[in-house]
Image: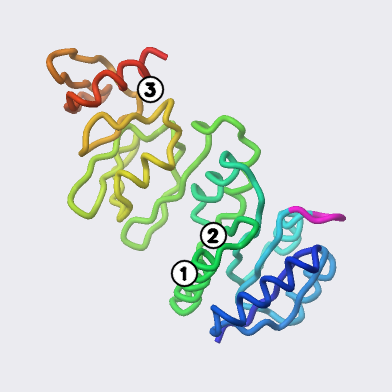
Amino acid sequence: MITAIIVDDEQKNVAMLVSLLHQYCPQVTLVSTANNVASARDSIERLHPQLVFLDIEMPYGSGFDLLQSLPGLDAEVIFITAFDQYALNAFRYAALDYLLKPVNIEELEDAVIRAEKRIKEKNTTRNYDLLLRNLEEREGIKQTIAFTDNGRQHLVPLADIKYIIADGSYTHIHTVNKEIVSTKNLKDFETLFPAKVFCRIHNGHIVNKMHILKIDKGRGGYVTMKDGKELEIAVRRKEEFLKIFKK
């Protein structure tokens, strides 16, 4: 069983989440609820829950204020938010779970299963500082993303990613300083990264246009990256890529 608390200032949201947890997440035992930062901090310090469902926007202090007041927090956190797409990428880049309001049942179940797995493995990644830095940085390309490679975490500025190459069920992320292997596929990265900078020029690779040295405009053509790597441009992607590159 996982002990949990809910932190949300709206009672109807608390009641709905309690009901959903009872019906769809029987592995979760709710030990307390709180409607502000002060009462939440008291409950966490007193009860030591394994999981916190944390609303972001509350009166008299936000969910982020709560995290900053508990630097030694030893719990998984699932954020509950109504943020826009820009802000949601900040959560994804920091590898943190979030639920959009109104809470979707399948997304709730998936988030709880991931949290349960990390709790059992004692393999918690708490990139709260990274999340806050990303939220403060309005320009997406200046944000930082967390990658996990063979159990080790790497924090990489998006601007340092040169290109990403598919390799079966893995992808190789080539950065300015290192190569990282990820289990995410190219479609995941295509969806996640800002399209005005990261271009899918082939089924097998994505490039960061800031790291392109030159473009050969043959039938399909290819790009030469600043590190000398040549990558083919698929014929059907060429026109769209050139439009993005010119912009």
Cα gap from disc 1 to disc 3, whole angstroms: 35 Å
Residue 135 figure quarter: top right
Q: Residue shown at 18%/27% (left/top)?
A: 234
Q: Pointer 1 and pointer 2: residues touching (CB < 8 Å)?
A: yes
Where is mark 1, residue-wise? Answer: 114
Where is mark 3, residue-wise? Answer: 210
Predominant secondary structure in magenta?
loop
| Earlier-in-chain disc, 1 versus 3 | 1
The quadrant the N terminus occupies is bottom right
Q: Residue shown at 24%/36% (left/top)?
A: 205
Where is mark 2, residue-wise? Answer: 97
Q: Nearer the viewer, mark 1 or mark 3?
A: 1
Q: Give, as a single range, the part of the protein colored magenta.
A: 57-61
Residue 59 figure quarter: bottom right
Cα gap from disc 1 to disc 2, whole angstroms: 9 Å
Is 105 on the left-hand or right-hand side of 243?
right
The quadrant the C terminus occupies is top left
